[in-house]
Amino acid sequence: MDKQVLVKIKNLKKQFIKKTGPFFNRKVQEVYAVNNVNLEIMKGEILGIIGESGCGKTTTARMLMRLMKETSGEIWFEDQDLCQLSESQTRKVRKKMQMIFQDPYDTLNPGMRILDILMEPLNAHEKEVSYQQRIEKVKQTIESIDLKPAEDFMYRYPHQLSGGQRQRIAIARAVILEPLFIAADEPTSMLDVSVRAGILNLLLELRKKMGLTMMFITHDLSTASYMCDRIAVMYQGRIVESGPTKKIIQSPTHPYTKALVSVVKDLNYFIANRENIILDGEVDATRKQVGCPFVSRCPHQESKCHTVEPKLESLGQGHLVSCHCHSDIMEKTS
Ligand SMILES: Nc1ncnc2c1ncn2[C@@H]1O[C@H](COP(=O)(O)OP(=O)(O)O)[C@@H](O)[C@H]1O
Ligand SMILES: [Mg+2]
């Protein structure tokens, strides 16, 4: 693997079996939550994964973090395929990669004090360090996420903190073992608008200070454009477009990305005459897949789109798109 690449995902798939209907007429449906995803994350970069609810963002991150097993595919981290590791080997790698969830209540045990919550990973992975040094590390970590002085916070329980402070503690828990990689899954979407910017800036600051590599999941393109060096757009379990953030925002090429970009007002101030594109319908992961996954909602379709699934093609400068009509679309809009 290229030395600059930290994570490489190859042909990753996850299929769920969903049961619907009353018990006397149960129907079993296959859900293709992640469908042949290929991705690279370079050392030190923040890669954004963006797409509407249900498109497979969380499932991708959970497989990468080994919180869920894949149906098939490979996940390379440094020089190991995580899908091939034993339980004990996986435990060692976990120290290097951590996840921050949407709702800090999911990660913070309500019956434990902040001190004990943050001691837990140290007790599991750094037993050789003295108890006093571990306490000292907890204090330093709490102060590094801007909760000062640490003594005011470490003896409290999660419910005694505000939502923003709780998410800061969840971030402290993720970084206390000094990981190489963080997956943040919509870390601000449950928080008050007033504290969101603080959390985003904290993540950017930690990335700089600790040299972290990050996968940043969001359904909000303006947050992605603020946070990410590169963006991958997901639609129905697939990456449909990816590239440097500036390229995706200024020259989106897939009709789905175009629609996402067109409705975010604060991204459009510098692009005159861009019309809002409102899509009908929603993601349906249970639809049997023939042709392009976006065809039922696409304003540009040709007959080929109904029969042949498009592949990701390079447009140069790291910009990839999977759309049969991309050259026509680019001509029309240039
Ligand atoms: N444990 C599960 N069992 C069955 N279906 C699931 C499960 N987890 C996720 N899904 C389905 O997989 C699809 C992708 O879900 P998810 O990865 O959570 O999307 P996102 O994070 O982009 O909103 C959705 O259709 C969802 O209903
Ligand atoms: Mg999700």
Image (spheres, rainbow, N blue to C red):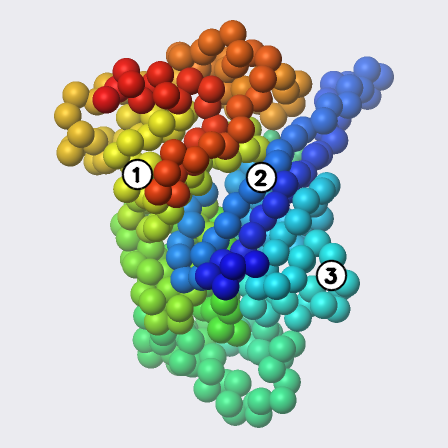
Give the label on residue 247, or none.
1
Q: Position of residue 115 (x, y in %)?
A: 51, 76
**Residue in the foreground of this view, choosing between 166 and 242:** 242
Q: Residues within 10 Å of mark 2 (few under 14, many from 20)?
A: some
Name the residue type under label 1: Lys
Whichever of labels 2 and 1 marks the residue nearer the N terminus, that label is: 2
**Would you place residue 116 above or below residue 282 in this image?**
below
Q: Residue at x 57, y 63 (%)?
A: 78
Can the viewer see residue 162 in this picture?
Answer: no
What residue lies at 50% left-to-right and 32% top-to-bottom? 312
Q: Dot 3 surroundings within 10 Å: few (below 14), some, or many (20 or more)?
A: few
Residue at the top extreme, as displayed: 303
Q: Is residue 173 above or below residue 50?
A: below
> Which residue is identified by label 2?
37
User: Image point 53% across, 41% down: which residue?
Assistant: 57
Which circle, 3 or 1, is nearer the viewer?
Answer: 1
Based on the displayed image, in which of its 4 quarters is residue 268 positioned? Answer: top left
Q: Are marks 3 and 1 in contact (CB under 8 Å)?
A: no
Left or right? Give the position of 72 relative to 328. right
